[in-house]
Image (spheres, rainbow, N blue to C red):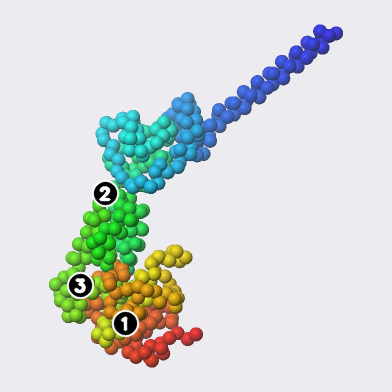
Amino acid sequence: MKSKVKSRRVGLLILIFILLVSFALCLLSGIFFSIPTRAAELYGPADPNLSPLKLYTQSVILLLSHDQLTSPTNPLALGFEFPINPGDSMGEILTGLSSLNIVDHPRAFRAYLIYTGIDKRIQTGDYYFSPGMSEVEIADALENIVPAQTTISILSGWRMEEIAETLIELGLNISPEAFLEAVNLEEKEGYLFPGSYQVDRNISPESLVDVFYQEFLSQITPDLEEKIDYQGLTIQQAVTLASIVEREAILEVEMPLIASVFLNRLKLDINLAADPTIQYALGYNKDQQTWWTNPLTLEDFNINSPYNTYENFGLPPGPICNPSFAALQAVATPADTLYLYFRAACDGSGQHLFAETFEDHLGNACPE
């Protein structure tokens, strides 16, 4: 009787053991087959030519290294080019990337290249890596050779800080700080001529500033210079006044009228009272996230600055932005008027209402 009970217990234990082993095998099997699926969810479809074993091993490496592969390698670094020459092996490429601290996890990086099939599609040429790229983004970039040049566009009325902000996204090996330092050192605010430029990605800050400045010089023809001189202005003064006209005008057609107002005020020794000079003096407005505070408050007009043309007579110390040729031409050939005042029209059209007397100027105010 006891032997039968004992046999039943042994049989039950064996059955339980078999069930546990089966469950464990099913669980492991599920985990095993889900690994490539999980990798596909994170990294996209795998190279269809991979063998099952290679697919599985690369998927495991990728899952274990996900954070390392998707975090920026060096967010504070400058962008730079990396050459891949004909005949370079995968090992040589990985060694080069690792030695330059572009890739910190070569084993995982290699697994991603193999998993995606990028390892078979890398072309020779110069590749550009911008700051803050993750190793996945660097690997993906190896399929696309970045052109040696890039296009920089400067809008009329931008101050140098606004130009500097655009450099971050263009893949230039120039930090905004280095660009601003070069502009200030050479005193070229106002002379960074608006337009589009094709420049080398590895251009220096000083050379970039000179590209803009040379284009400015090409616009100052003897005829324009003669007309500026006729207005009793130096080139520096003309650029400074043109920068104010640029920021005041909404419609280009009104620039000669606005220029005539400021030139008339200068001749009569009346302060310019130009809002854009206050905006320039205030600098960046964190709340509005702009370099041009609008609207201005009464307190803003009391700012202690040589650029405050409400409190100081004459032109400010220098340009407040980089004006267009139209603004320069308006200063050189202003409209022939006796206007001393202007204000924005009340219809939102962007037009201005001009007046010769302060009484008429008050009459042009918008009804409350």
Of all residues, the one furthest to the right in this rendering is 1
The numbered disc on residue 202 is: 2
Residue drawn where x is 26% and y is 49% of the image:
202
In-image side of 332 versus 67 (left or right): left
Whole-angstrom CA distance, mark 2 to mark 1, is 45 Å
Query: Disc 3 residue type?
Result: Ile
- Residue 365 visible from this viewpoint: yes
Label 3 packing within 10 angstroms: few (<14), some (14-19), many (20+): some
Callouts 2 and 1 close, C-beta under 8 Å: no
Q: Which residue does the numbered mark 3 point to in the structure image?
A: 235
Label 1 packing within 10 angstroms: few (<14), some (14-19), many (20+): some
Query: Disc 1 residue type?
Result: Asn
In-image side of 63 versus 302 (left or right): right
Q: Quadrant of the N terminus?
A: top right
Q: Earlier in the sequence, mark 1 or mark 3?
A: 3
Residue drawn where x is 17% and y is 74% of the image:
225
The numbered disc on residue 271 is: 1
Whole-angstrom CA distance, mark 1 to mark 3, is 20 Å
Residue drawn where x is 46% and y is 38% of the image:
68
